[in-house]
Amino acid sequence: MLQLLIFDLDGTLADTSRDITDAINYAVGPFGRGPYSVEETKRMVGSGITKLLHSLIPEDSPAAEGESPFEEVSKRFMDYYSKHLLDFTLPYPNVKDTLAKLGRYKKAVLSNKREGFSKDVLRGIGLLDYFDLILGSDSVTEKKPSPMPIIELMERFGVSKDETVIIGDSNYDIAAGNAAGITTIAVTYGFRPAEMLRDAAYLIDDMAKLPGILSEIER
């Protein structure tokens, strides 16, 4: 019997792409990079924003005195994004109604977004109270696609591999889940195309279909 559902955030529960795009473009603008489109951002994000930002600017870029270019671009992103987390971010269709039907399960969010930002987004779109625990990139020693944060969640909740499922939109979510030995469910409406999710055990194009998939797994 399933006990724990682990959800990704960006691209799975909420469409955060426009706000992330705006923050990236603000951060990299002084370095002569961008502007990037929302679709470009969707293809780039997933492994953590710091790693992404560092990949977008040259190492020898000029920066403010006393700061490296990587420190400056990261600071610019964090400053902007913290003020614009919810300008355009919304839950995907049927997410809230589906979460309301999953009361018998323990539910956690595992995001490569920082924990504070993750909680602020979930609170802002009315989803925070559906979850028992939120882990972000700064809550764990390793990020997805490492299985380590999934293993940590299973230990915290006292559940086994057979009792745990991860739901995400990214190849990072699926790779982490498979490495941890749990069942993987990919949503195809998020940031990654379906062909990148072929290693998932199940694919759904609407969060409303999740309860049916969970029932199938439990049979």
Image (spheres, helix red, strand yellow):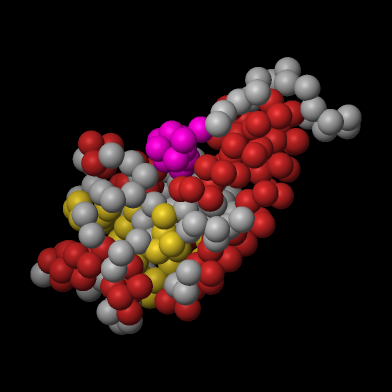
Say whether residue 218 is left or right of residue 40: left
Q: Is residue 141 magenta?
A: no
Main secondary structure found in the magenta portion:
helix
Query: Residue at 33% across / 79% down in the picture?
Result: 100
Res. 38 image quadrant: top left
Q: Quick one: 105 or 44, which is closer to the camera?
A: 44
Q: Which quarter of the rendered picture does the N terminus lie within?
A: bottom left
Q: Is residue 88 above or below residue 123?
A: above
Lateral position of residue 71 relative to residue 16, left or right: right
Image location (x, y in percent) of residue 217:
16, 64
Image-quadrant location for residue 117: bottom right
Start and end of the magenta stretch? 36-46
Q: Relative to 60, is 92 on the left or the right?
A: left
Depth check, front residue: 216 or 11: 11
In the rendered image, the vertical position of residue 198 relative to residue 95, given as above or below = above
Residue 44 magenta-highlighted:
yes
Residue drawn at (61%, 25%) of the image: 33
Q: Residue furthest top?
A: 60
Please say whether residue 91 is visible from this viewpoint: yes
Residue 154 spot, x, y in % from top left? 41, 64
Above or below, 67 against 209 in this view is above
User: In the rendering, at what x and y percent does residue 68 appear?
Assistant: 78, 29
Residue at the spot x=46%, y=48% of the render?
A: 17
